[in-house]
Image (cartoon, helix red, strand yellow):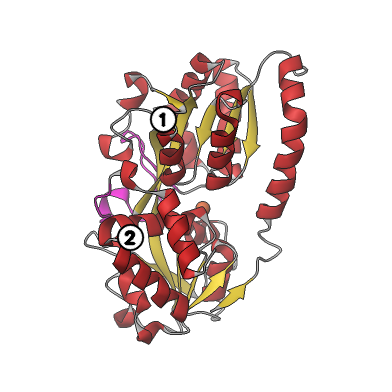
Amino acid sequence: MTTLRRTRRNRPAARHLVGLAALALTAPLLQSCGLFGGDKLVIYNAQHEQLIEELAPAFEEATGIEVELRHGKDLELSNQLIQEGDASDADVFLTENSPAMSQVEAEGLFDELPSSILDTIPAQYRPESGLWTGFVARSTVLVYNTDLVEESELPDSIMDLADPEWAGRLTFSPTGADFQAIVAAVLELEGEDSTRDWLEGIKENGTVADNNLVALEAVNSGQSDVGIVYHYYWERDRAEDGDLHDSSEQHYFTDQDPGAFLSISGAGVLESSDMKEEAREFVEFLVSEEGQQILADSYALEYPLNPAVELGGVKPFGELQPPQVNVSDLDAEAVVDLLTEVGFL
Ligand SMILES: [Fe+2]
């Protein structure tokens, strides 16, 4: 196993940490003093920054409610919320993937969402508890270099990537929340022993990338034959006429394979919020036809979950064949334990 480092194109992790630390020191002061002219709605955001920065101004304009975004990664922010408990400044929590939502839900930190929000999103994309909801979905894919891999060689299952024929040919990013959500799905669908075996197999076969764009670059440049990512990384590069997609294509797993896993980005209102009404308004806007259309028209290329809005230019949502996974059963902590045991973390 070797490691591919992040490139100049994509260097957010360290910057976020510094930014977050600085905010942690200054933000409570700014907020409580109302230096910006009244209380702002504080959103702990683990979704991609650009995605939420396209939506937040439209919400501010529609409602007159000012928003303060604090960015971080899924588990970084879920653990911060758990640590802060009732004292947290957060009013809304947004994640890239659902395991971090379930983690916060298990600590009893979410307030129930009203049916005006829940009824907007099909039941399979939110927990039965009604404590949070999905708002966009992302499909797992295998990106492959078209010069190095014949279509006929592509695996039927993501589980096959642990087989010896893929030795030295695979790249993925196990420190990222995206890959960890995929592992959570494998764990739920295949059980602990098979998941451990699979992780040991892909560790043996694979190269570790710092993040998904590095994995994409490795495949497109031919350093690696195939890479496990979500669909929007390759699709965004294509849409932006970037240089990470020309020599590669995406392979969508089918037949409810764990590799066809659809990961759900979640939104919830914190029980400790002192702006719950405004927080609910934000989540309502996020799942509304207007909010979902803004996301669909944005750079993001993630699938809106409000059935009234369709995403064009990518594989149609209805053609995906994801496995049935109960969002509440995806266990972030069990995945971290397994990845640690296997030596990825
Ligand atoms: Fe991502």
**Is residue 135 located in the magenta-colored stretch of the structure?**
no
Q: Which mark is residue 186?
A: 2
Q: Give the camera-side residue of 108 and 6.
A: 108
| Element type at mark 2 | helix
Q: Work out how far the residue at label 1 is from the one at label 2, CA to CA, in angstroms.
A: 28 Å
Q: Quadrant of residue 221?
A: bottom right
Instruction: Name the magenta segment's main secondary structure.
Output: loop
Q: Is residue 293 left or right of residue 77?
A: left
**Is residue 316 located in the magenta-colored stretch of the structure?**
yes
Q: Is residue 212 left or right of residue 180?
A: right
Judging by the rendered image, the residue that carries numbered circle 1 is 287
In which quadrant is the C terminus drawn?
bottom right
Residue at coordinates 33% horizontally, 43% vertically from top-left?
327
The number of discs equals 2
Find the magenta span and give its range. Answer: 302-325
Q: Amino acid at mark 2?
A: Val
**Label 1–label 2 contact, CB within 8 A:** no
Badge 2 density bin: few <14, some 14–19, many ≥20, Cα 10 Å: many
Image height check: is 115 above or below 261?
A: above
Residue at coordinates 40% horizontally, 29% vertically from top-left?
289
Q: Is residue 118 visible?
A: yes
Q: Amino acid at mark 1?
A: Val
Residue 337 image point, x, y percent = 45, 58
| Element type at mark 1 | helix
